[in-house]
Image: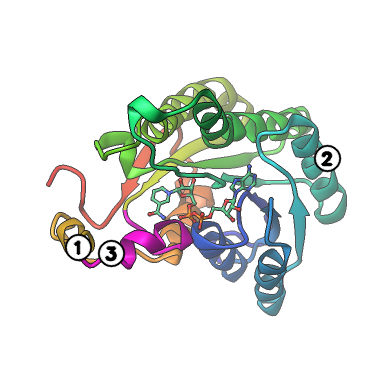
């Protein structure tokens, strides 16, 4: 098992990709704190799955863009599950709004969650971990849209491209203190976020035609890659961003 005995916080883990990551982490031997902002029953379902694999689980509500809530989350997890070894900054939102119609509020909220949230959770965790001298790993979840142009994403795409710069720069500062930082950029993954695409007969075939594997990915297919990046097998890997997209980019 790749993550035996590790303690992980996964943000936005009540559904979608976060849920897939939590399931794989539990199967690989990790205890998991499932962060959520809404839908507590879904987070509890994920916790039950983790426990069914013989691992400890807790659910913890926090808005990743709120410093006070993030600090309380990390402190609670540390107290209940022990020192945290792994953080996956998965929580994210996507809205599709034409550039000329985008409001200040839409821009700010999206950047706050997708970018500032990853920075904030990482900073709070590193301030706990680094003084202990323990090793840790952080994985940020970006998006294929870091490298692609799709309509109505003048706020979303920059938030995800910036995740790559955040990953590199954070890695340079914290890797000397034994915290590795990497990033995955998922392609089209079948989750509640993309339900509207998966159910759009006029849109889906055109997208799938651009993907070498000709299909959307499943959340657990991101989970297995994130588990590898968090494992000791990736001990010499930091500051990197990996597209996990079935071969969409560059086609
Ligand atoms: N699904 C895809 O095709 C795809 C592709 C590329 C990148 N991504 C990224 O992967 C991540 C997960 O996406 P998904 O498809 O599972 O989406 P999703 O909408 O199904 O799940 C996202 C989860 O994050 C939670 N969340 C939102 N704001 C939060 C906040 N402020 N604090 C805590 N939790 C919050 C939501 O409640 C939800 O449970 C996101 O960062 C998304 O941008 C998804």
Residue 53 spot, x, y in % from top left: 66, 76
First-in-chain label (3 vs 2) = 2
Q: 80 and 111: which one is in front?
A: 111
Gap in Å between the C-alphas at discs 3 and 1?
A: 5 Å
Q: What element carries label 1?
A: loop
Say which element carries label 3: loop
Q: Look at the numbered disc 3 and say if its residue's Cβ is closer than 8 Å to ligand 1.
A: no
Per the model, the C-alpha gap separating discs 3 and 2 is 40 Å
Ligand 1 near label 1 (Cβ, under 8 Å)?
no
Q: Residues within 10 Å of mark 3 (few under 14, many from 20)?
A: few
In the figure, 116 relative to 90: above or below? Answer: above
Q: Report the side of 248 relative to 19 (left or right).
A: left
Q: Mark 2 points at which residue?
A: 72
Q: Residue 202 carries which label?
A: 1
Label 2 secondary element? helix
- Image quadrant in which you'd find residue 87: top right
Position of residue 227 measured from the top left corner of the image (x, y, whole percent): 50, 56
Q: Is residue 98 magenta?
A: no
Whether pointer 3 and pointer 1 mark residues with C-beta atoms closer than 8 Å, the reply is: yes
Q: Quadrant of the N terminus?
A: bottom right
Horizontal and vertical percent position of residue 6? 67, 55
The residue that label 3 is drawn on is 200
**What's drawn in magenta, residue-wise?**
188-201
């Amino acid at each position: 098992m790749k993550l035996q005995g590790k303690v992980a916080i996964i943000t936005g883990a009540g559904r979608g990709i976060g849920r897939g990551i939590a399931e794989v982490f539990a199967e690989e031997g990790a205890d998991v704190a499932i962060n959520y902002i809404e839908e507590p029953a879904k987070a509890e379902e994920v916790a039950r799955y983790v426990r069914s694999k013989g691992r400890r689980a807790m659910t913890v509500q926090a808005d990743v863009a709120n410093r006070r809530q993030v600090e309380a989350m990390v402190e609670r997890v540390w107290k209940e599950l022990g020192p945290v070894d792994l953080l996956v900054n998965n929580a994210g939102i996507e809205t599709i709004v034409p550039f000329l119609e985008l409001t200040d509020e839409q821009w700010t909220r999206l950047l706050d969650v997708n970018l500032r949230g990853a920075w904030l959770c990482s900073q709070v965790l590193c301030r706990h971990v680094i003084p202990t001298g323990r090793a840790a790993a952080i994985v940020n979840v970006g998006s294929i849209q870091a490298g692609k142009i799709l309509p109505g994403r003048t706020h979303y795409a920059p938030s995800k491209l910036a995740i790559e710069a955040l990953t590199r720069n954070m890695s340079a500062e914290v890797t000397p203190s034994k915290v590795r930082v990497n990033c995955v950029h998922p392609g089209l993954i079948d989750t509640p976020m993309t339900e509207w695409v998966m159910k759009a007969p006029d849109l889906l075939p055109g997208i799938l035609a651009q993907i070498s594997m000709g299909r959307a990915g499943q959340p657990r297919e991101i989970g297995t890659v994130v588990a590898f990046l968090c494992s000791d097998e990736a001990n010499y890997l930091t500051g990197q961003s990996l597209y996990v997209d079935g071969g969409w980019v560059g086609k």
